[in-house]
Amino acid sequence: MSALKGIKILDFTQMMTGPMATMLLADVGADVVKVEQPAGDPFRKSGETGIEGDGAFFLGVNRNKRGVVIDLKTAEGQEQARKLALEADVLVENFRPGFTDKVGLDYEDLKKHNPKLIYCSITGFGREGPDASRPALDQVIQAYSGLMQVTGTRDSGPLKIGFPFSDLVTALFGTIGILTALQARHQSGLGQRVDLSMMDASLFSHVPRDVYFSLTGQTPERWGNEHWDIVPNNVYGTADDQDIMIITINDKFWKILCEAMGDPGFATDPKFATKDARLANRQELDDRLAALFRTRTLAEWDPILREAGAIYGPVRTWPEVFADPATQRNMLRTLTHPSGKAFEVINNPLRFSETPTNIHSPPPVLGQHNDQLSLDSIWSASDDRQTGTPEQKEVS
């Protein structure tokens, strides 16, 4: 059984934020129909790596969906899109504000004819205000929201986060918003509009530093791998030039670390025995730890720290992460593009005992399911959505 079986989602989104939100809903059983303009989602052409014209980025966030092409610039296309919207449970769009009004897909009109419709609008800067019509990409939002201001080191200056954080966090909030609206509809029988901007979602991610700023008026410094209130909290090199992340959140774990390193006296040294002392002598402590970790290889340190119960983690490369048996078993699934070429995607991390997630189909090629538009209802079309090879299905 799938948690959202029978929920019909009309997906007008493109690029990453919206498509990832609808993909997560498709993973738990929603029937997602992705609607693209004739030129296709721009993400299909993003980057140089892909399969038969479908870019790797597109393939990463559009599984488990059916795909149709509808030209919203034509009267026929607008009529087709409206018909789908009036039959849908959820409509998700990330057009610039005002576009849906022009093509007959505005919420106020649709809800008169489909009062159960949940209509999720995802924008860059909100639907109103001086920035509403500005184009917004992840990097721009990271800069504008202040995320870059607290990322990096004191020497590096502001840096963007190493993955599309604003896209991802907005997608997660979009999924939460749609699920919340579905639960509300279960109680009231009515849909509603869900409004979400990348800017607001990124601002929310400042928690809990928002309270610090409120109380002090000071922008948190850029600490890189370090932490403003915890020492040690840093990356140290080993004898074989590997890196290891070490954190001691309190005096207990500081003592555990020192005993594991074979220097219990380090823990009781007045300069380092307490949190305040370690903060006051940060550089000296870091230098001493750096010298200690250089005395053994990562392979030697790993079992020592693990057995001691220290808080640590080797800084692994991508090949190491993706070769990990646990990653391969739990978090990677193989899909086959319609061209026949296989590729791996990261599995949904949620585990349900009764309604498992399911990766059952690769992203659609452009217009793959347009023949279903000619049916009385595309939602009644069967495409074996709950079947797939063992490599394509989540095992609870």
Image (tube, rainbow, N blue to C red):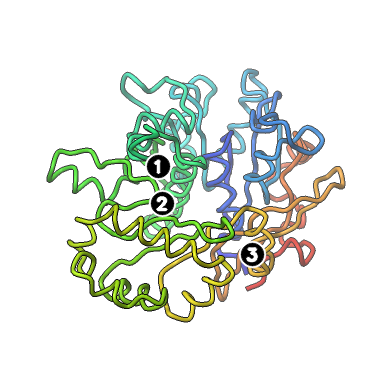
Mark 1 → mark 3, Cα distance in angstroms: 34 Å
* Residue type at the position of mark 2: Ala
* Residue type at the position of mark 3: Thr
Q: Earlier in the sequence, mark 1 or mark 3?
A: 1
Query: In this rendering, would 396 be left or right of 113?
Result: right
x and y percentages locating residue 198 in the rendered image = 41, 36
Mark 3 → mark 2, Cα distance in angstroms: 33 Å
Q: Is 102 drawn above or below residue 44 in the view shown?
A: above
Q: Residue at image x 78%, y 32%?
A: 53
| Residue 374 visible in the displayed image | no
* Residue type at the position of mark 1: Val
The residue singled out by tag 2 in the image is: 181
Q: Residue at image x 49%, y 65%?
A: 295
Crowd rating for badge 3 (residues with CA inside 10 Å; few <14, some 14–19, many 20+): some
x and y percentages locating residue 368 in the rendered image = 78, 39
For label 1, the SS is strand
> Decide: marks 1, 2 in contact (CB < 8 A)?
yes
| Quadrant housing residue 13 | top right
The residue singled out by tag 1 in the image is: 194
For label 2, the SS is helix
| Residue 319 visible in the displayed image | yes
Residue 238 or residue 2, whichever sits in front: 238
The residue singled out by tag 3 in the image is: 327
Mark 1 → mark 2, Cα distance in angstroms: 8 Å
Residue 73's tag is none
